Image (tube, grey):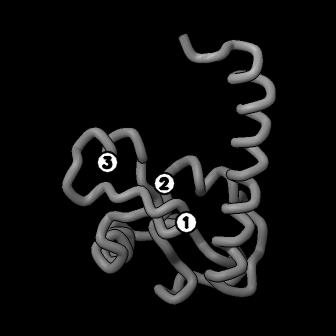
Amino acid sequence: MGLSYKLKMQIFKRDRFKCQYCELDCLSDFDKWYYANLNVDHINPQGGDDASNLVTACRTCNLIKGKHPCKNFKEAKALVSFKRKESRDWFNKNVIATYPPA
């Protein structure tokens, strides 16, 4: 069973509607909030639903982290940062290099 609406809102409010991985701030900008599609992520998917195991994450960061079990938030953030860098490098090599900005 998924997290309750009440618990999700507690996490969103605690984190001030900000992705804890990439720090996308959705608190005062509707477009950012809308496109971020904020989720509540389990730092360790097997770690239970305690608030200390939950963070606000934008959809992209949540997908990047996936179900990888992390020991703590610092490890989870490092994993997401590393994977985002890999994606950025791929984008620069395969998109920007092929189709430079006009």
Q: Are marks 3 and 1 in contact (CB under 8 Å)?
A: no
Residue 69 sits above or below residue 91 on the image: below
Left or right of residue 60, residue 79 in this image: right
Label 3: which secondary element:
helix
Of labels 1 and 2, earlier in sequence is: 1
Residue 28 sits above or below residue 97 on the image: below
**Where the C terminus falls, by quadrant?**
top right
**Pointer 2 local density, CA inside 10 Å: few below 14, some 14–19, many at least 20:** many
**Where the N terminus falls, by quadrant?**
bottom right
Residue 39 picture location, percent across and down: 46, 58
Residue 7 in view (yes/no) = yes
Q: Are marks 1 and 2 in contact (CB under 8 Å)?
A: yes
Residue 18 picture location, percent across and down: 38, 64
Q: Are marks 3 and 2 in contact (CB under 8 Å)?
A: no
Quadrant in the picture for residue 7: bottom left
In front of the other: 83 or 50: 83
In front of the other: 93 or 19: 93
State how many labels appear.
Answer: 3
Residue 40 picture location, percent across and down: 48, 65
Label 2: which secondary element:
loop
- Residue located at (68% from left, 13% from top): 99
The residue to which callout 1 is attached is: 21
Label 1: which secondary element:
loop
The Cα–Cα distance between marks 1 and 2, rounded to whole angstroms, is: 8 Å
Residue 45 picture location, percent across and down: 69, 73
Foreground: disc 1 or disc 2? 1
Give the residue type at disc 3. Answer: Trp
Residue 50 sits above or below residue 84 on the image: below
Identify the disc placed on residue 58. 2
The residue to which callout 3 is attached is: 33
In front of the other: 38 or 3: 38
